Image: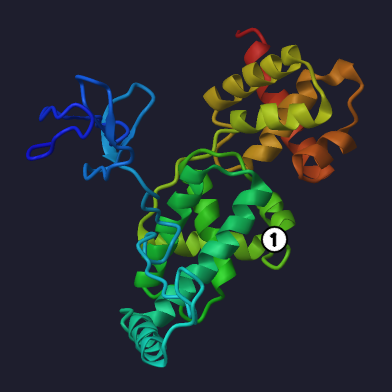
Amino acid sequence: MKGSVCPECGSDILVTDPATGEVSCPSCGYVVVERGLDSRPDWARDEEGVERKRAGPPLSIMFHDYGLSTTIDQVDVDATGRRLPKEVREDLLRLKKLDSTSMVDLAEARNLQHAAYILQIYADKLSLGRQVAETAMNIYRRALKKGLVKGRSIRSIVAGSLYAACRLMNVPRSLEEFERAYPMVRRRTVAQTYRLLVRNLGLKAPIQDPSIFVTKIASRLGLSQKTVQEALRILDEARMEGLVVGKDPIGVAAAALYIACEGCEVRQKDLAKAAGVTEVTVRHRCRELRDALSQEDSPTA
């Protein structure tokens, strides 16, 4: 600190600690300023200690304004608890009104806030990660700008967007699970909304692999890892024969598990309930898989 001297020894050499902001004398150790003002930018560090970005709450697509909102609270006292004068209170009220009316589109902001609330309910009930939720919110924003929300319920578009995000990121969630998580939106509505988004937004979701549902169904029934591996082998052979194209992947996965654990005394009813499909679906898929596997194992003439 130039122009300052130590009051203890009179030295004109003072050192500032950049970590704590303290100003001390290196000669006698006297602390001149106990708490200084650190004017440096506050940087956040990653696990390796590399400075990457400014600290503070990160931007998030889950908010209608990406987290850059300004809120003016209606208070009548200052920081010390004393009542504000009437002129100051009127100025704050005027600023609050100007701030609320300065939004570009208040109706769109309310729409996005309501959509984010419903999306969070789905994400919590279905145990989905932040990346899936943000992808779904991005799809919803695109649908809102394209006018697909007009004339339709917000919750149905949110459900379709989240189901599309699960399909895009290969997260195994069925329509039945969506209906159980939020019964106000039926699975038929989720499927219809999903097709609407795919058709109008140009989404290209990959074909769901039945293998991603095998472990999930097996964990509900407490099946062994050996049974899971056998079911995956059956699905690999069925995929080579083209039996998984155009069929419900959950039903195919349940049928492969039923064939793999025929000696484990697992009832078809319990397996269908764990998979969320009907017993008829399991029987039909089992018949198709058995016919294909028997033809493959039969000797050629």
Q: Is residue 174 left or right of residue 26?
A: right
Considering depth in this image, is 64 or 161 the residue closer to the camera? 64
Badge 1 density bin: few <14, some 14–19, many ≥20, Cα 10 Å? some
Amino acid under disc 1:
Tyr
Considering depth in this image, is 67 or 256 the residue closer to the camera? 67
- Kindly identify the residue that appears in the image at 32 percent across and 33 percent down: 20
- Kindly identify the residue that appears in the image at 75 percent across and 25 percent down: 257
Looking at the figure, which quarter contains the N terminus?
A: top left
- Kindly identify the residue that appears in the image at 67 percent across and 39 percent down: 250
Looking at the figure, which quarter contains the C terminus?
A: top right
Residue 288 visible in rendering = no
Instruction: Find residue 178 and report its image quarter.
Output: bottom right
Q: Is residue 104 above or below residue 279?
A: below
Residue lying at the far left of the rendered structure: 3
Considering depth in this image, is 73 or 90 the residue closer to the camera? 90
Q: Is residue 137 above or below residue 128?
A: below
Q: Is residue 297 left or right of residue 79?
A: right
Name the residue that disc number 1 marks.
Answer: 182
x, y (%) of residue 274?
A: 80, 38
- Kindly identify the residue that appears in the image at 79 percent across and 26 percent down: 258
Q: Is residue 249 above or below residue 197?
A: above
Q: Is residue 150 left or right of residue 181?
A: left
